[in-house]
Amino acid sequence: MSDGIERDGLKPGDVVVITGAGGGFGRAFSLRFASMGAKIAAWDVSEKLGEETTRLVREAGGDITFFKVDLSKREEVDAAVKGTFAKYGAPYCIINNASIYPRAPTVDMTADAFELAMRVNIMAPFLIVKAFAPKMMENKRGVIINIASGRALEGAAGGVGYASSKGAILSFTKTLAMEWAKHNIRCNSIVPGVSFTAQPLEATNPEELLERGRKSIPLGRVGFPDDMAGLAAFLVSSDAAYMTGQAIAMNGGRVMIS
């Protein structure tokens, strides 16, 4: 028996906006979605990294445009939104991936550093989805994927701004899912665990990070960008058409949530 409702998913030619596309998860998302036929609007604060992702995607035959944008500056977010609309029109998917992790004990964390984390990690995703939402609603289809963190579940000693903003991402995602389901826009979050990316490597070295995975994670390894790209590819597909408002942990069993 069928209810007659189409199970929508990413189609070739659909547009995907990816913040923090210059490296790590963002680069993996860009390459994976381009290989699926999507057009990539790659946003990053680093021109060097953004252009490298652009080169890699184009060499693989993908359609990508780089937009240099500092997510802490509202005027730059607005400009990137306008540029994306001008180049590609409305996106089918938005991946709010970019974030910063200022490190200091809470008593030493400056108000400016805490506020900056909030501007980049949660205010920017709010501004981005709010700007694109009217056209996505008009199209009656779309997917939002917000990248949270295991720190939202466990806390982060020395990272109160990061952990707080990532906790906010989880509630933000659920709220969008509740409000936008009637427009056929699905909203989910990915909750990565310790992964081999630039952010944890700011505070350690590759060998120590890999060893941490072997010793402290049930599956015996850290995550890698391609792990998250595979999950994102599922979330944007028709196979996930009945999934919204969920926080999906990808952490090798480090934190188990129900």
Image (cartoon, rainbow, N blue to C red):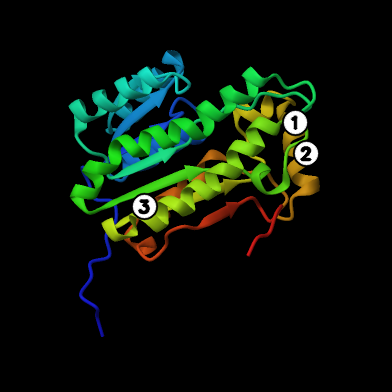
Q: Please rate how many residues cluster around mark 2, counting C-alpha atoms within 10 Å: few if below 14, some from 14 to 19, many from 20.
A: some
Q: Position of residue 132 (x, y in %)?
A: 29, 38
The secondary element bearing badge 2 is classed as helix
Q: Position of residue 209 (x, y in %)?
A: 73, 34
Near-viewer residue (150 or 175): 175
Quadrant containing the C terminus in the rendered view: bottom right
According to the picture, the residue beneath numbered tag 2 turns out to be 211
Residue at the image position 59 percent from the left and 51 percent from the top? 250
Near-viewer residue (194 or 110): 110
According to the picture, the residue beneath numbered tag 3 turns out to be 236
Mark nearest the camera among 1 and 3 is 3
* Label pair 1/3, CB-CB below 8 angstroms: no
Q: Is residue 165 left or right of residue 18?
A: right
Q: Is residue 99 left or right of residue 62?
A: right
Furthest-bottom residue in view?
1
Quadrant containing the N terminus in the rendered view: bottom left
Residue at the image position 22 percent from the left and 46 percent from the top? 12
Q: Is residue 26 left or right of residue 85?
A: right
Q: Is residue 183 left or right of residue 200?
A: left
The secondary element bearing badge 1 is classed as helix
The residues tagged by marks 1 and 3 sit, at their Cα atoms, a distance apart of 34 Å
Q: Is residue 19 above or below residue 222?
A: above
Report the number of discs: 3
* Label pair 2/1, CB-CB below 8 angstroms: yes
Q: Please rate how many residues cluster around mark 3, counting C-alpha atoms within 10 Å: few if below 14, some from 14 to 19, many from 20.
A: many
According to the picture, the residue beneath numbered tag 1 turns out to be 207
Residue 190 seen in the figure: no
Q: Position of residue 189 (x, y in %)?
A: 50, 49
Give the residue type at disc 1: Glu
Give the residue type at disc 2: Glu
